[in-house]
Image (cartoon, helix red, strand yellow):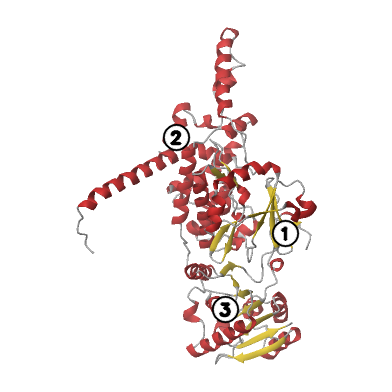
Amino acid sequence: MWLFLAPEFHERGSFRAFIAPPAPLFAMGRSASGQMNRSLDVALLCTAIVVATARDSHAYIDPGAGSLLLQVVLGGAAALAVLTRRYWATLKSRLGRRTAVAPRDRPQ
Amino acid sequence: MSLPHPEGGSFRDPAGRVWRAGARIYRSVAPRGAADYEFVRSTGLLDRWSGEGRVVAAQEVDPGVLGAAGAGAAYVLEHPKVPFVSHPYEWSFVQLQAAACLQLDLHLEALRDGVSLSDASAYNVQFQGARPLFIDVLSFRRYRDGEPWLGHRQFCEQFLNPLLLRALLGLTPNAWFRGSPEGIPAGDLARLLTWRHLLSFNTLSHVWLQARLQVRARASSQTQLETLKRRPLPRRSLEGLLEQMRRWVARLSVRDRQPSLWSDYAASHGYAGAEEADKRAFVADFVARTRPSMLWDFGCNTGDYAALALAEGAGYVVGFDADHGALDAAYRRADQGGLAFLPLHMDAANPSPDQGWDHRERRGLAARGPADAVLALAFVHHLALGRNVPVDETLRWLIGLAPRGVIEFVRKDDPTVRRMLALREDVFDGYDESAFAAAVGRRARIVREEEISSTGRRLYWYDRT
């Protein structure tokens, strides 16, 4: 069930996509000459996106491909969990302030 | 002033390295690490944390103190010395758990100021008594947007998996961890888990799935790996992963098959009340008169005598025991009392050796001595009778570790020894009181000796100075 929470899973539709780069980069060599220009444009756009988000890796130790892939998989759910927890905490503190006005008797 | 020499275990991070010069500890910051160091320094985090006692204090000093070795360093820091360096494979469950929580807490706090941790090595945490202390200030780097948790694999192998071995399987990880000092791989742990363990989302993800993905990644091409390297992880996701891990690790608890042998030692120690008092008085007298700054307590059990020694004026006590139930209890005592007491797992018949790269990365027990004094109470017979180490050898080893100490002789017909030898043949002809005293006397002066139980136990205070 949790796999479906990873947004990438839906977008690419395939688990293998996690380790495969965007398809157009590979399609470039195979397209017919008539579609060459369009594929080239798409490829350049994808490359631009990748380059724009690219970072030099500052990992001096081997982070482990398994670990990086796992973080891709869990990332979406983890962010969601953080947001939910913070929202819930804010909600609880707001509710807490309201009931502080009319305290209830709690059994000891 | 001794020449500085590089610390054996500090070479992997190109941002800098640690040096020893006599009793002083320095850390040089290489030019490539300068920018990150300056940024982290500007946030004030390091100062705040060292004030709280969670990160080692660092003082910038003139690079000239390192002489030629410091040439080219952008900065040189001096750190106060940790009283006794210990390794993660010598820690009990609660110690490793405390160290793991510190690592994660620091990472989460750092992120709020735009700082991240570049690794998650368990060797970056040391203990001062019961307090974990993060010692590698150069692990803190400026957070780059989109950077994943780079230390996640290392965290799992050096913190999480050893904890899970005990929490999920009831196995103590120390022997394995010591043999594999860079940690326990997810793939190995995954093989030991049953389907029941995998019902936990956390275990399923960080152990089983990580292992499967690692295997899968072997089939990746270079291009695919490059893409993976560049794939950004949103900051909120990073925080989420850290928080989730923090919550999970804090909740873990020991799951042992049966209660450990000595954890209820107090009930079965073979002393009547008054005899216990005599033993305590002897040890208290020894400590009060010798005032050791560093005392090693072999067979420290739950730390009764360690606590006594500290109360009587010992500076710092390192306790060694092979029983995990006792160690967990000893750590809790140190933690609750804020004691300068560090209990560690050690099998005296197989103490930690020098290991790692060039046998110099992780120093063994002997290399971390000598101590000022040793206590060996209800201990020698475990080696001499339990493990067949000749009693003369045992005493030679013990007396060699510190110039003075208290050693207890327990007779073969003592109830606890009889039980230990119940299934065995008595091959210990040379084990008796006179041979014991002679073996001590050959190597040191016996300052004081006293019989302290009706079963013939004797204490010997030796001094070889």
Q: Height in image: A63 above or below B98?
A: above
The amino acid type found where label 1 is placed reads Arg
Proximity of marks 3 and 1: CB atoms separated by less than 8 Å:
no
Check if mark 3 and mark 2 are on a common chain.
no
Q: Height in image: B410 above or below B302?
A: below
> How would you rate the neighbour count of disc 2 (Cα within 10 Å): few for under 14, some for 14-19, many for 20 or more?
some
Q: Which residue is mark 2?
A: A6
Whether residue B293 is visible: yes
Identify the residue shown where x is 55% and y is 24%: A49
Q: Position of residue B431 (x, y in %)?
A: 68, 86
Q: Nearer the viewer, residue B443 or A91?
A: A91
The amino acid type found where label 2 is placed reads Ala
Q: Height in image: A26 above or below B33?
A: above
The amino acid type found where label 3 is placed reads Ala
Distance, label 3 to label 1, CA atoms, is 30 Å
Q: Position of residue B38 (x, y in %)?
A: 62, 44
> How would you rate the neighbour count of disc 1 (Cα within 10 Å): few for under 14, some for 14-19, many for 20 or more?
some
Circle 3 SS class: helix
Q: Chain of mark 1?
A: B
Q: Nearer the viewer, mark 3 or mark 1?
A: 1
Q: Nearer the viewer, mark 3 or mark 2?
A: 3
Q: Position of residue A2 (x, y in %)?
A: 42, 39
Pick whichever of labels 3 and 1 is earlier in the sequence.
Answer: 1
Q: Quadrant of residue B54?
A: bottom right
Whether residue A74 is visible: no
Q: Chain of mark 3?
A: B
Which part of the image, by quadrant, shows the N terminus of chain B?
A: bottom right
What label does residue B309 carry, if any? 3
Q: Which residue is mark 1?
A: B20
Q: Chain of mark 2?
A: A
What label does residue A77 carry, if any? none
> Could you tell me how many numbered marks the image carries?
3
